[in-house]
Amino acid sequence: MKLDLRLDTSGDFYAQKFQPTKREDTLILNMGPQHPSTHGVLRILLEIDGEYIVRAEPVLGYIHRMHEKMAEVMSYPQYLPNPARTDYLHALAWGWAHVGAVERLMGLEVPERAEYIRVITCELNRINSHLLWWGAYLLDLGAFTPIMYSFDDREIIMDILQRVTGSRLTYCYYRFGGVSGDIDDRFVAETREQCARMKERFKMYKDLVTDNYILRQRVEEIGEISVDTCRRYGATGPVLRGSGQAYDVRRAEPYSVYDRFDFNIPAYDTCDAMGRYMVRMDEMQESIKIIEQALDSLPQGDFIHPKAPKRAKPPAGDVYFAVEGARGKIGMHLVSDGGKSAYRLKLRAPGFSNLSLFAEVSSGTLISDAVSILGSLDLVIPEIDR
Amino acid sequence: MSDTAEKSGKAPDTEETSKPEKSPTPLYTGYDLDYFVAPQDLMEAVRKLDQANFFLEDISCLHVQEGFQLVYHFDRFDQPGRVGLRVMLDRQEPEIISIHHIYPGADWHERECFDFFGIRFRGHPNLLPLLLDPDYPGPPPLLKKESALKGLQELYPDRVHTPVEVNSEEFSREIANCSNTKNRNTL
């Protein structure tokens, strides 16, 4: 008996458009939008041959909120909390991209102390983001315990940031011309203590997890992405650095005071999921190095420019401002007509470009490896859908 | 390390400090090269950028009185420097060739412009709504009302909108030498 499994695959709009190939022995499967490994509401249409993926196509937009429209109807200060709601794991970097774009267009000066505070808080946030990725990725791969350890560390960093920013996840701390509040001695002491603690923890993480044979079997030689693939798709961040290209906006297009610190850009040319894993593990240690240097040389002064405008009103024109987020290059293209809200604000989400190469990379792999690849891309769906 | 630290000091910007609210044009816009390109020359320009090892950052779109302005942003890994390509599209029937053959990553960016502005990309393999619901009833959400539209002259008062000659050697040389080194640490 010949069974045509495609009979029942008419599905919704996207499933219908996702035409099966000529083969009769394949099956169309929806992975998501509620699949644990997609960390949110990402849906992937798969055409599978047994356990192997023939074709994959991500379907986006399940939590699209039109942040770009909001930028056009809200005034600049009203929009300040918005960028943090796109990538909630590295909220400060998104906030920075927004205030940075406005500052660049207005030619607004940021006091040195404020730049240092931004670097310290943004790097703390980056560590937090990587820690959550680390725990969640291992959870995807079947290791339950590490997320408990990573949340233990995250909790301390969130407490530190909560005291100065007022929130624990979706920070709105940066203002045009500085930050909303100064850091104090307690912040400095707690941050130093946490940096020292993290260094010990990283040793344990290496022994317990990174060197683990089972983990290595799941990530080594899985999801190999060449530098040229990254270039054609515009992938940045740890995905690109895991392919051996040491490109980091903090070094390539230095903003703020990043050029004063001594840190490495980790890159691994294994091109596989392990490479991306190692990049993030090393990057957390580099962030600690940056934080410690910034604390050592923290200048005195204003935390916000005394003449910083309450209601920003940049002149007509456009600028592009990019920062390095935990997932890659966050870019903002701001066009102003001289009014009190943006004429147009385009958000470049790194996860958007990173995910777009998934269709190419996943074809021919096992479904379980696709889960490993997806996790190694470190997706945050609200950022992709915006 | 130490001498770069000295250079990056904000001392030269003292004029800005005194009057932060009134600065005519930014010292650095984030673009190291910024071109206007005729729609029929876009493919050639993108091909040259591809040969010069650029990657596509994103495709931004702007609704103005004259029509739609697509802004393609490119950057480079080994020798960083941002190139902007600006293409003006017709107001009634905005259409442009898809560049996904050269940059497959453009696929989603183009679908996003189709979603938000209704721009059609010729030769796009899969021009379906990406972020919006396929049943979304209204007009594209980022289209502006007639009264809110601004002209290019109002948005970019100091700029000349003449298309660049993409086949010229000068264009190839400029993109090959594109670098953000001289613009680093300017706000």
Image: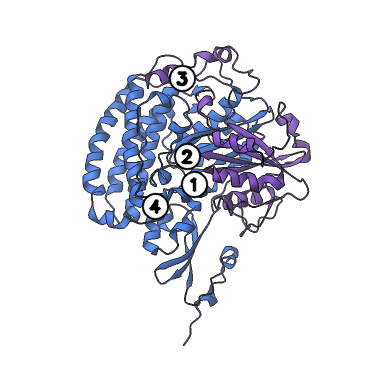
Q: Are marks 4 and 1 on the same chain?
A: yes
Between circles 4 and 3, the one closer to the viewer is 3
The kind of residue tagged 1 is Arg
* Cα distance in 3D space between marks 4 and 1: 20 Å
Q: Quadrant of the C terminus of chain A?
A: top right
Marks 1,2: beta carbons within 8 A: yes
Label 4 with label 3: CB-CB less than 8 Å: no
User: Under tag 3, what secondary structure?
Assistant: loop
Write the residue at 39% across / 27% down. A120
Question: What is the spatial separation of the Cα atoms under label 2 and label 3, in whole angstroms?
Answer: 22 Å
Callout 4–callout 1 Cβ contact below 8 Å? no
Circle on res. A231: 1
* Chain B drawn colour: purple
Considering every residue shown, the one lying at the far bottom of the view is A1
Q: Nearer the viewer, residue A386 or B124?
A: B124
Which mark's residue is nearer the viewer, 2 or 4?
2
Alpha carbon separation for disc pair 2 and 4? 24 Å
Query: In the shown orientation, is residue B87 left or right of residue A144?
Result: right
In this rendering, the answer to whether A349 lies above or below A370 is above
Q: Residues within 10 Å of mark 3 (few under 14, many from 20)?
A: some
Q: Residues within 10 Å of mark 2 (few under 14, many from 20)?
A: some
Image coordinates for residue A190, horizontal then vertical, percent: 30, 27
Hue used for the chain lettered A: blue
Circle 3 residue: B8
The residue carrying pointer 1 sits among few (fewer than 14), some (14 to 19) or many (20 or more) residues within 10 Å by Cα, namely many
In the picture, the disc for residue A375 is 4
Question: Can residue A83 be seen by looking at this rendering?
Answer: yes
Sequence-wise first label, 2 or 3: 3
The crowd level at tag 4 (other Cα within 10 Å; few <14, some 14-19, many 20+) is many
Q: CA distance from mark 4 to mark 3?
A: 38 Å
Is residue A155 visible in the rendered image? The answer is no
Residue B62 location, x and y as percent?
68, 40
